[in-house]
Structure formats: C-alpha cells, structure tokens
Image: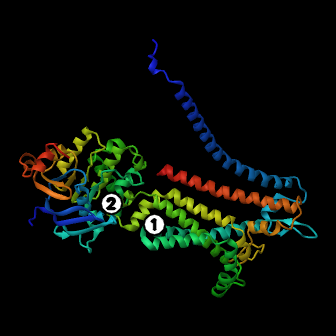
Amino acid sequence: MRLPESDIQPPRSARKRWAMDLGESSIEMLIRLCGWSSILFVLMIFFFVFREAFPLIGNSEFSFKEFFTSINWRPTSEIRETYGVLAMIVGTLSVTGLSMLFAVPLGLGAAVFLSEFCTGHVKETLKIVIELLAAIPSVVWGFIGYMVVGPLVVEWTDAAIGVNLLTSSILLALMSVPVIVSVGEDSLKAVPDSFREASVALGANRWETIYKVLFPAAKNGLLAAVLLGVGRAIGETMAVLMATGHSTRIPHSLVDPIRTLTATIASEMGEVSRGSTHYQVLFLIGVLLFAMTFLVNLIADLVVRGIRKNG
Amino acid sequence: MNSCTHIQFDHLTVHYGERIALQDVSFTIPRHAITAIIGPANAGKTTLLKCINRTIDFESTARWNGSVYVNQVDVMHKKCDCIDLRRRIGMVFPLPVGLPLSVYENVAYTPRRAGMKSSPELDALVEDCLRQAMLWDEVKDRLQHLGTRLSGGQQQRLTLARALSHRPEILCLDEFSIAIDPVTTMKIEDILREMKKTTTIVLVTNLVQQARRLSDTTAFLSSGRLVETGETEQVFEHSANELTRRYVCGEFG
C-alpha cells in the first residue's frame, strides 16, 4: 500500500537530517580522537625513552645484572665505568615510602576535616591556602629544605648534615599533601548527604559515619588521591636533588644522605655525550621509573577491583 | 501528659531560612499505636519526623521554637544526647539509602555500633529483620553483595530492615511504600500491625487509604499547620474541619 502524500519526508528536512548526522559523527570522531591520543602519547613517550635505552642490549660495557645489583655508580671512571643503580632504587623507594608515611595520614585527615568539619570562611581560606601550597615551584621547596628543614633536622637528630633522607621526605610529604587533600576532599564531597543522614539516623556518631560510611563510599577517589601523591613523590626531581645529599649509598638510618633515580637523570643528562653508554643508561633509568609508576598504578587498580569484588 | 503519650509536640515552630515549615504544632502521639501523618505536599510532614530524631540538625538553615517531648524529655533542647536518641528511633526515608556496605552489614550497622560482635546471635538478628521487611527470601543468597546494588524497592525494604535492627521504641516511616509493589506493601502492613504491640509507629504517607486502613490515630497537616488530629475513624468519617474532609475524600491535595 502506498503511503499518503503527506507522510513522505519532504526533501528539505532530509537535508537537515543529513547535516545533523554529519555534526553528530564529526563530534563523535573528535571525542574518539581525544581518547585515543592520550593513549598514543603515553605509548610514544615510552617508545622514545625505550629507543634511546635499547642499544644497551648487546653493549659489552654494560651488564643488566650489575645495573640492578651493584651500588657502584661510576659512569665517568677512568679505569672502568660501572653503572649500578641499586642505591638509587633504594633511595627513591625509601624517600617515597617515608614521605607517604607522613603525607597520607596528614592529607586524608585534612581532607576529612575540610569536607566534614569545616564550614564557611575557614573552609574557603583553608582551601585557598592549600591550593597555594600546590603552586609553590619545586625549586623553592628545595631551597626551603636546604635552608630551613635541613638545619632543623640537624638540630633535632644526630644527623651529620642537613641534606638527607628525612629532610627530603618531609619536603616531598609537604609537596604531596595539597594534591592528596584536594582530590580527597573532592571525593568525600561527592558522597551524597543522604548517606551521612542515614548513618546518623541509625545512631552512629561522626567518627563512625566517616570511618564506616564515607571511606567505603569514597574509596576509589581516596585511593586516587593517595596515588597522585605517590606519583608526585616518585617523579619529583628538583627538590630531592637539592635536599637528599645526592650520595650514592644505601641509607642505614633515617638521616643518611641518599640519591634518587630522578635526580641522577637531571644532574647528569646535561653532561653526557649523545649516544654514549652513560647516555643510554640514563634513559634506562627513565624506563625503570616508568615501570615503577606503572606497577604502582597496576597494584592500586587490582586493590580497587579486589575491594569491589568483596564489597 | 499521661503514660499513653509517647511523643508530644508542644508549640513547635520550624523555619528554614525565611520559609515557615511548621507553625505552632501541638499534638501527641500515643504509645504502642500507629499514628498517620497526612497532608498535601509542603505541609511539613517530613520536618515533623526530622524533629523526632533530631536529623533536622542537618538542615543548616533550620531554626526552631517550642519542644518535642519523647518520653517526657525535650529532644529539641541543645543538651539532648542525639546519638542515644537516634539509637532508640528507627527511620525509613522516602528515597531509599543503601549504605555502601554489604546487605548484611547494612542491617548489622547499628547492632555493631552498639557493640555486638559477629556471632550466631547477630546472624539471627539480621535474618529476623530482613524477614520482617519481607526481603529475606530475595537476598538470602547474596548477603555479601553491595546493598546499593539492589533494586529501588529492595533498597527501601533494606532500609526498613535496618531501621528495625536496633529494636527501636519508635519507628518513623516516611513514605516507606512508594517503590514497593502493592502485594509486598500489604504484607509489610500486616507486620506493622503486629509490631505496634511493642513499638510506636509514626507513618508519613501520601496514600490516604493507607493511613485509613493502618493507623489508629491521624494528624492532618496543611501548610505547616496542624489542621486536625484524632482517632483515625473520627478524622475520616466525621471530620471536624472542612479542609480535612475534602482532603480525605480526595477533593483536593
């Protein structure tokens, strides 16, 4: 049966629809491009870092076993160059771990305070101050570490010099706290008020509500906050270069000087000749840092999935 | 005030900022009976419930005058121990709020706060509460799943089970049946009739017929004022006030 004339789409509206379809699909393409490009950038960074380090395979002057197990970092030795980064791995891990020990309780505590206990002007002021803290350049932090925190650490402990593991951990903690606070506060704020009311209506006090309801409800965001803090601490270069002492040793106490992977790259990259073994090893350190952050993220992801499955 | 009175509103006025939510409300809620609070939207029904367990504290703009006596203690007073008060009152919200815990832990939340450890005793309590809320058969195989993953109606019954878990002396139900099917609602109503032997139940509802078939006394609110209160039979059959008569007959509201 033929449709009545009036039900057939007039050509003008068909053209309109075609234009709409084009608009729709081009926007979809654009969004797709944005998504893929972020993956592409990560892969390209990985590729370029890896490409510079790749010739080390088969390089007779370099052994991977020595790289991971030796603490001797003598890339400019006259007799025999050695490229052992064990001390730096330990340095990076210890300074990151110690700083997180300070920063996570402090940051999450501040986030809880800001989102649950603070109101009005105090809250606004605190948020602005914390954001300001995040905007301080890392070289200024290094300077503060060198001039203020270091002497204090020498005064309070039996440290031989002010630039050491403890000083740099305190600095890194202070640097990561703003990140942890602002992301943590956002995720706590995203928990609907009805959860708080329901919990309180059941006779729970504030602490029970925070611990039993808000933390589980905001766990993904809080974990992301901690991870961003860890990322900041692992990747930080300038402040640790100035405040760790830059000494290639495995620390035996909290106040021993250390050296981190990032600081090594930063301080030596300018002096190596392009393509030399030393140059390639610095890129290998970059690959190592890459692997470490990847591992941290992977573990966190698995932890979140574990929580979800059990929850 | 006689011993049959459980809750007494005494010249209670509540403002949210400039807006008046309740104005000079005075009436009593008898012990071990079902009291229905009915009235059109914006009448102040939910505000009334929020005063009983002092969750009105969460409304940052709320100010109040007057008193609410629960067991002859003024709970609107500054010095009231709100946490103890809330532990004696069960509250079911109109929009169900499953806490981000497992089904089991949702119900065990209050008993645990009160110091009950995991035990067969707690298991039995959880099962009992879930049975009373007509939810047990649907969730008994997935007690460890997240409570927030249940359907809307199931979550509403979960909040009911949770409200029962601390064996409250007062149970406040704010539109408990909006997401529950009629058959299950009827079953829950039967349980409420059973429960009123030991519990005072305050029922806020928009379903006039539900108020009629379930409650012993009824209070009718409109625009923040108490229009009429009395035995349900009397309020529905022989309304003293023209507004009440028209509302219960479905002529306005």
Which of the 4 quarters of the picture holds residue B46?
bottom left
Which chain does the numbered disc 1 sit on?
A: A
Eyeballing the image, is B33 above or below B16?
A: above
User: Is residue B70 shown to the viewer in this render?
Assistant: no
Observer-nearest of B238 and A291: B238
- The residue lying at 54 percent from left, 65 percent from top is A182
Which of the 4 quarters of the picture holds residue B227?
bottom left
| For residue B73, side relative to residue B81 (left or right) | left
Amino acid on which disc 1 is placed: Ser
Q: Residue extending furthest front?
A: A12
Q: Which residue is mark 2?
A: B111
Do the CB atoms of the residues marked 1 and 2 lie less than 8 Å apart?
no
Q: Which residue is mark 1?
A: A115
- The residue lying at 32 percent from left, 45 percent from top is B136
Which of the 4 quarters of the picture holds residue B226?
bottom left
Observer-nearest of B66 and A80: B66
Is the same chain shared between marks 1 and 2?
no
User: Is residue A213 shown to the viewer in this render?
Assistant: yes
Which chain does the numbered disc 2 sit on?
A: B
Graded by Cα atoms within 10 Å as few (under 14), some (14 to 19) or many (20 or more), the crowding at tag 1 reads some
| For residue A16, side relative to residue A194 (left or right) | right
Q: Residue extending furthest top?
A: A1
Q: Which mark is residue A208?
A: none
